[in-house]
Image (cartoon, coloured by chain):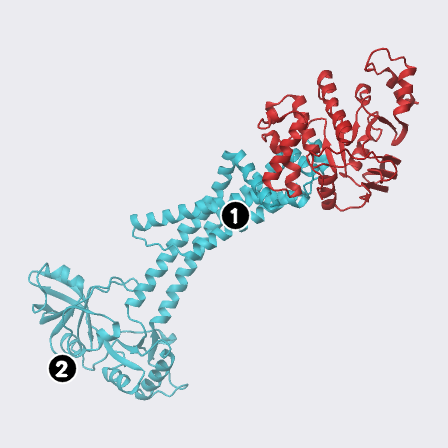
Chain colours: A red, B cyan
Amino acid sequence: MIGATLAGPEVRSTGEGDRAPVIQLDDVHKTYYMGADIQVHALRGISVQVEQGEFVAIMGRSGSGKSTMMNIVGCLDHPTKGRYLLDGVDVSTAPKAELADIRNRKVGFVFQSFNLVSRTSAIENVELPLIYAGVGSRERRRRAEEALEIVNLADKMKNMPNQLSGGQQQRVAIARALVNDPAIILADEPTGALDTRTAIELMGVFQDLNRERGMTIIIVTHEPDIAEFGKRVLLFGDGRIRKDYDQRQLEVLRKEHHMSELGGSAGSWMDDVHEEDAQ
Amino acid sequence: MKSLAILRIAFWALGRNKMRSALTMLGIIIGVSAVIALVSIGQGAQSMIQQQLESMGTNVLMVWPEDTRGSGGARRNSDDEGTLTAQDVIAIRSEVPLVTAASPIVNANGQLIFGNRNTYARVQGTSEEYPLVRDWEIAHGEFFTADDVAAAARVLVIGQEIVDEVFDGVDPVGQTVRLRNLPFRVIGVLASRGQSGMGQNQDDTVVTPYTTAQKKLLGQALPRVNQAMMKVVSQDAMPFAESQTINLIRQRHNIVPGMDPDDFAVGNMSEVADAAQETTFIMTLLLGSIAAISLVVGGIGIMNIMLVSVTERTREIGIRMAVGSRPGYIRLQFLSESIMLSLAGGLIGVVIGGGASTLISQFSTMSTVVSAGSVLLSFGFAAAVGIFFGYYPAHKAAGLDPIDALRYE
């Protein structure tokens, strides 16, 4: 079940039709029922595919359904209607315990508020998913050390979360997300609690994981600067996907806005994206 | 592998809050040690009573004369109104084969004087088979013989307490004492036995041939006995020996069963022993259940702390679920925490309870018995308390929704 090792130099094939998409959502709806007759339609028919090795940024205003989408993609929640295939397997109706196993094997989470277990050392936090995967303690330690090396934190292994800076804590969280060699890494506002410089640094870590290791990464953010790291941007609005920009389209948008500065961190083109959403 | 790792997480979580864990355990510690100490007192009393009843002689059948004129069948022991005679006892001895020894008992209490000392002695007139019937050894000297009984000899065998009170270091055997103002020769001393099962001191007993008691001490016109004691061959033979004895006495007293009331009553020590055992057993049960209440209170303490802990660690639970912990693993983790608390508390409680009962037996007159049963019972009860009161908080933790738990502040 946990086949490939992390350290392996091989890069996952960037699915060119020969493999099923990592994520396939077919007309997914999510409706919350609050009380007798109040219904909240958080998702109103989402259909999207994410291929292996993609780096997707999801944008949208609060209440646009992007968090609900993340919960469903992360197997924390079931869709009310529709079908969700993760790595080719239909998980739309899997029972709770099975969902937990799927999260354990296929999904790595990074949260805005880091969500490390307090008073527990960095390496033990990274080992957490491996405990539930039933990996032996020695193997657990070895793989956790590897994961921490990938995020350049090998020297802080024994530190407690409160002895680490925000950026370092988030890197521990990334190490924890990738330690089980998951099919996707889901990051929900991963830079929301960090200053701009640290945020850019952290996005570099994600970018390396995507480029060098071919990991599929999905990031939810409301900051255009951060979204720019993505190779594809999904724009959410009112429970639907309003826009789906691929890399080429994003280039066009950038040019239109005469991005003068190198690296294009001004992010003015994103304002347009938001305006479209508002209409 | 997985369960072991989860147990380690639980253990580590308890270690993170040492003070809280210790205080939570305290409830169980007090409960278990109270159960063990109190039950040990109860069982100590039980075994003491058992010992004393055995010291009265086992397999002993007793017959008392009973007044037939009084209403309600109230038992009378008065010397001149009973109808039981020494000849009845002799007949039982010779005609009931299951009876291996028999002694009549004639009460003839009186003042016993030696030199310038005196005491009120509990005098029993009996036969030469008395030591056999009562399983009573002679510590010093000898017991009287059938010849002494036939001759109504003025000889005494005295209890240890009489020796201590009256003889003051003088060897009593061979001495002459005055009992009810008649001179008697002391020929033996009974071994010390302490209190009887009914709480009566047995060491102030003085025995003499029943003939001597009837003729010389009491001067009865119609020789009667107050009681007859028969040694039966075994415990199993008691019911047969009893019915045969009853039939024989009825026959001798011309009583038609069903028409005339019996003028005697039959009983045995095992009935007394059973009653005493039952009483002390109920006492032990009572003490144990009162202590068990504190164990339950300790369990509620565990539940309280576990509920606080689950609320406090909601976010941790959310994280664990997000990285792939099944709800069942969360349940196992929290349940193990409460079971570890109760087992550790139980273990410490066993040690403290055992120590306390040892101290009680050393510094008081109570004897205590710590039995494997009470240790297992209280330890098992503690474990059960841990499971019972730990289940709800653990179930609550396992039922948390990971999305809500992750957002919990």
Q: Nearer the viewer, residue B391 or A249?
A: A249
Residue B3 image position (x, y, % from top left): 60, 46
Q: Residue at x 49, y 37 (%)?
A: B23
Which is in the foreground here, disc 1 or disc 2? 1
**Label 2 element class:** helix
In the image, taking residue B327 as reference, residue A80 lies left or right, namely right
Write down the residue under mark 2.
B147
* Chain letter of the residue beneath label 1 in the structure image: B
Dot 1: within a 10 Å radius of its alpha carbon, few (fewer than 14), some, or many (20 or more) residues? many
**Label 1 element class:** helix
Tell me the CA gap for discs 1 and 2: 68 Å
Looking at the image, is A39 positioned above or below residue B261? above
Dot 2: within a 10 Å radius of its alpha carbon, few (fewer than 14), some, or many (20 or more) residues? few
Looking at the image, is B160 positioned above or below residue A34? below
Asked whether residue A191 is in view, the answer is no
Amino acid at the residue labelled 1? Val
- Residue B296, numbered circle: 1
Residue A88 image position (x, y, % from top left): 82, 43
Q: Earlier in the sequence, mark 1 or mark 2?
A: 2
Amino acid at the residue labelled 2? Asp
Image quadrant assignment for residue B315: top right
Looking at the image, is A127 positioned above or below residue B112? above
- Residue B31, numbered circle: none
Q: Nearer the viewer, residue B31 or A265?
A: A265
